[in-house]
Image (spheres, rainbow, N blue to C red):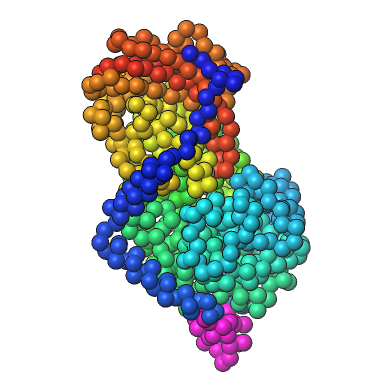
Amino acid sequence: MIRSGSETEQMGQQPPKSQKNKLYLQIMKKLNRLRAMSVPELCFRFARYFRDKRDKQRVLRGDVDSLALFIAKLNGQADSLEDKFRVIYTAFHNRRPFRWQKKPREQFVDLYRTHFVKNLNLCAKAAERYIKGEFTIFGLPVHFAESIDWHYDPLLKKAIPLVYWRDIDYYSEKIKEVKYIWELNRCQHFVTFAKLFYLTGSEKYARALFDQWTDWIKKNPYKMGINWASSLECAFRIISWTWSLFFVRESQQLNPGLYAHVLQSIHLHAQFIEGHLSKYSSANNHLIGEALGLIYAGSYFPELAKAETWRNLGFAIVFDELLSQVHSDGVCKEQTTFYQKYIYDFGILMLLAAHYACVSVPPEVRVRLEKMAEFYVALMDQNGYIPNIGDDDGGETLRLVEGEKNRYLSALSTAAVLFSNTNCRKVCTELSEATLWLLGESAIGTFSQLRAKKENRFFIHFKSGGYIVMNQDKPVPQKLIFDCGPLGLAPMAAHGHADALSFTLSVDGTPVLIDSGTYLYLGAGQDRDYFRSTAAHNTLTVDDRSQSESLGPFQWGQRAECTVEEIIDDGKILRVQASHNGFRRQKLTHHRTIEARDGMWYCLDLISGVGNHKIDMYFHCAPCETSRQNQSVSALFPAFTAELTFHQSDSACREDIHIFTAWHSKSFGQREQHQVIQRQVIANLPLKLVTSIKVNV
């Protein structure tokens, strides 16, 4: 049965939950969160909560060191505070921590213009919008007619009150999606202003930068407001502010007094991070990013009184957590391609800081970062596409390029140069601008000299991460990614999706079968459950149940566990068999075999168990037209057709085929419709279902 037009079903719009069901979920959510905590963690969290509550009165009194007292505490000796800070300011001016600073400014600018003059024009256009108060936040235009309201929620169209940060519950309905507020407050457009000053010498950009910078500091007093509610967001600001300062160092707008104010705010940011690290069960990518913030404060601003403490603590955390949160095969344990980029970027920025600070990096950390890049190489098709597996929050660690088209190719460009990695080089047609800023002038020569070997790897198994990449080259290049990995990083698996035994398919550089993506976090309401549910992925549900139980935006109850059972690769046939136990409450097991043979794909699903059950298989097509003929459905793309044939089951059953529209999200905050092919079978178990996929050019 095919439904279209007014009869088309829409997925991704969940029916309202009953009050009883809501209460159950709230209770289970709290219990599940408590179960994830050890006794030491509970003690730690209670102690920190009451410490912050006691701190509230001090903060409300404005009990923060005066600028003079702050300067007095800085490292260094002098006869007077004025002399002391003059020495500190001069030292800042003489500091050249970044590799692009090794060459005289005029020469580097000429080099930049030779290779990236088009990017300079894009950067200038973006800066003009920022000067006018015009921003685009996750696809949503936001305009500030006068000064920027740094607490403005563009979804609710109102500002969040300036109250003590602990009194703000950004999980409540009073704030629809806090990321829309935080994104602007990462101050990543500051880097655009500062970079333009460096490249053009125009004081206009420096003036715009410092006008907004001083405004931010004034309107965001220490620990007051929504922008102090996340240590990770504080770290992002430190990173952006650091690059901005060194880009704009020679501006007439920057003076010792202004530098002192900015430096004090960096100090307060690092101080907040140190006291609010994401420890214990919250130790995911946030902890690595927070530690990077400490590394930046401690490495690039050695005059700060706690610089050495923050530097040592930051490096120790990143070294430990990067190895802990990334499998030995380079797969991020959060099981998300997007957050893997965050952790990779944190690691690269850490390496550069370590080089400047003369800190020895364990060899296994460098190897792990290189493995992360090679994982991206394996996932990427010939047009640079990587599917959005797991959560995607739409952000970036550091914005060195405006309007960057492909964040993954940029990362691989840097990996190719930094690690002399020919596998990364072979997928990059050109050097990324970001690579030039990160690695300096020598990156151009190194990139051009790397010679990539042309090799076809038809099968790659990331045993620890659980992903299996299968390639065929007939009738055109095809790439299938089979997800046999865990739900996510224990104990929370906060950014994982219920996608066990799902797969994506790309044909000749065009996505064909896709992951539905993320859309929004807190702002999606019940749709958050849909986008990370089993039905939003290319796998199957039993009796309308997901394989893993969602207990809130970032929590899970019962979880599916995958096992790879057999792999056959004899040169003629490539076959992978795996299973998961996500339906164990129903005493069922889902086994799936993917076979590549003669340019075709075969998907064999076995649902073992007993009793009569409803099985729904989903195939999410990239935007295209579809047509059906008997037991086959064709997805029609401009250069080819992908034909899915549903072979008759040997078991007695009732079977239907539906085609309907659903939502998918290519990037955070945005969604569009696509066609879903659903095979629905009601039968007694055990049940075998076979689907073949043929590409016709």
* Residue projecting furthest to the bottom: 79
Q: Position of residue 586 (x, y in %)?
A: 26, 30
139 vs 134, left or right, is: left
Q: Is residue 67 magenta?
A: yes
Q: Position of residue 627 (x, y in %)?
A: 55, 13
Range covered by the magenta-colored residues: 63-88
Q: Position of residue 357 (x, y in %)?
A: 46, 66
Q: Which is more toward the observer, 150 or 443?
A: 150
| Depicted 39 relative to depicted 344: above or below | below
Question: Who's the residue at 48% across and 66% down the image?
Answer: 167
| Depicted 495 relative to depicted 625: above or below | below
Look at the image and tell me in which quarter the C terminus lies.
top right
| Depicted 256 relative to depicted 19: above or below | below
Q: Quadrant of residue 560?
A: top left
Question: Who's the residue at 28% across and 28% down the image?
Answer: 579
| Depicted 427 relative to depicted 365: above or below | above
